[in-house]
Image (spheres, grey):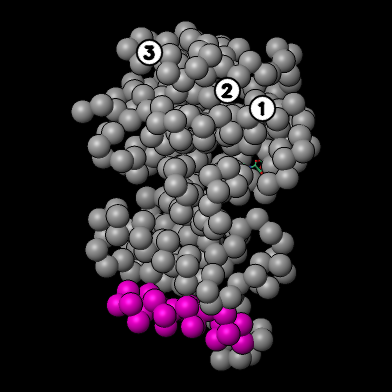
Amino acid sequence: MTRPTIAITMGDPAGIGPEVIMKALARPEVHALCQPLVIGDAGRLRKAGRIVGAEMPVDALTEAGAANFATAAIQCLDLACVPDDLPFGQLSAVAGETAYRCIETAVQVVQAGQAQGICTAPLSKEALHAAGHRYPGHTELLAHLTGTPEVSMMLVSPKLRVIHVTTHIGLIDAIARIEPGLVERVIARGHAVLVKAGIANPKIGVCAINPHAGEGGLFGHNEEAEKITPAVEACRAKGWDVRGPLPADTLFYLAGRGDYDMVVAMYHDQGHGPIKVLGLEEGVNITVGLPVIRTSVDHGTAFDIAGTGIADERSLVEALRQAVGLAPKSAA
Ligand SMILES: NC(=O)C1=CN([C@@H]2O[C@H](COP(=O)(O)OP(=O)(O)OC[C@H]3O[C@@H](n4cnc5c(N)ncnc54)[C@H](O)[C@@H]3O)[C@@H](O)[C@H]2O)C=CC1
Ligand SMILES: NCC(=O)COP(=O)(O)O
């Protein structure tokens, strides 16, 4: 069977993306899994390869269709847009523009059938904005580029899966945005992914917003009853095993010991904190609801260590594995 081609976007060239890509692609198991096609800058990859001591040759391609996965060289669709002297660890509009073009090109490559999924290295949201692309992150940019009205961010680690009702907006705005229809659609997206992954009747726990789920009205303004309970009831009426709203701290404890297949978090840090505590090595970010497959590392650009060669590539390796797992089976 043919290995699926996964388009790996280089992300912000001043961050650790190029280094984790070269480290990941130095692993034979990655090539056994998929045909990696890097979308980025061939010169930057070569530089990163020298830094991390993974000096495989890099073929600079002008079109994805020219990729030759039978060679030992890394196949890079070369956007040739990174100045040689671009410093590591510094925010810039040039780097933000590169990150944007990587994503835009990856979508085109997948839509043209030249890759079966996208796996993203990190970009700096600030650099993206400095380049004039006013998206909170990959998730919203990919939704825009594929004409998808609503998607959800799911974080997956070996012990825990979390899907988010809101992500990159301020906390006050997040609480205002949460309403039963949105909560129900997010639960449904997560449910569909789990069923597709082979969990026939997934057990889903839904977080409350307030401490102790409001403690019978003591904390908050009854947001649980107004914004979450109707969604849980609607899902239960479909026969799904959905419980909540539950106190978030307790729910994460129960999910961590295996009582739930997925947690529904109401806002960014509610879901991200528990996943990150488990370690960024195996955490993966999956965009649920896109017409294309997209997985990502679960960490950022790490400007503090970019260019030093010490970045850990394991989240990228796991993100590639997840992308392959989600890829259409006819292509795999
Ligand atoms: N998928 C993406 O594109 C993501 C992008 N970001 C962006 O990254 C930028 C920096 O975000 P931060 O909150 O500082 O998080 P960060 O993940 O970049 O860094 C947090 C800490 O973890 C360390 N770290 C991160 N990845 C590592 C790796 N692979 N190996 C070893 N150490 C690692 C860093 O050195 C730093 O000490 C922001 O602009 C943020 O928006 C953040 C998360 C995901
Ligand atoms: N906190 C996760 C994160 O920032 C990744 O966002 P995205 O770029 O995948 O939308």
Disc sitting over residue 73 in the figure? none
Q: Tell me the quadrant of the picture where the N terminus can be found.
A: top left
The amino acid sitting under disc 2 is Gly
Q: Residue furthest left?
A: 1
Left or right of 251, for residue 51: right
Label whose residue precedes the other's in the sequence (1 or 3): 3
Q: What is the span of residues highlighted in magenta in the rendered image?
A: 222-250
Find disc 2 in the rendering and name its residue. 40
Residue 35 is one of the magenta-drawn residues: no
Quadrant for ligand 1? top right
- Of callouts 1 and 2, the N-terminal one: 2
Q: Which residue is mark 1?
A: 98
| Residue tagged 3 | 68
Residue 248 showing in the rendered view: no
Q: Residue at x 29, y 59 (%)?
A: 195
Please name whichever residue, 154 or 103, is drawn nearer the observer in this view of the structure.
103
Report if the CB atoms under discs 1 and 3 are less than 8 Å apart: no
Image coords of residue 268 (percent x, y): 60, 59
Q: Position of residue 82 (x, y in %)?
A: 68, 18
Q: Earlier in the sequence, mark 3 or mark 2?
A: 2
Using the image, determine if residue 197 lies above or below residue 61: below
Q: How far across and down, in percent of the image, does residue 33 sit?
A: 31, 29
Q: Amino acid at mark 3?
A: Asn
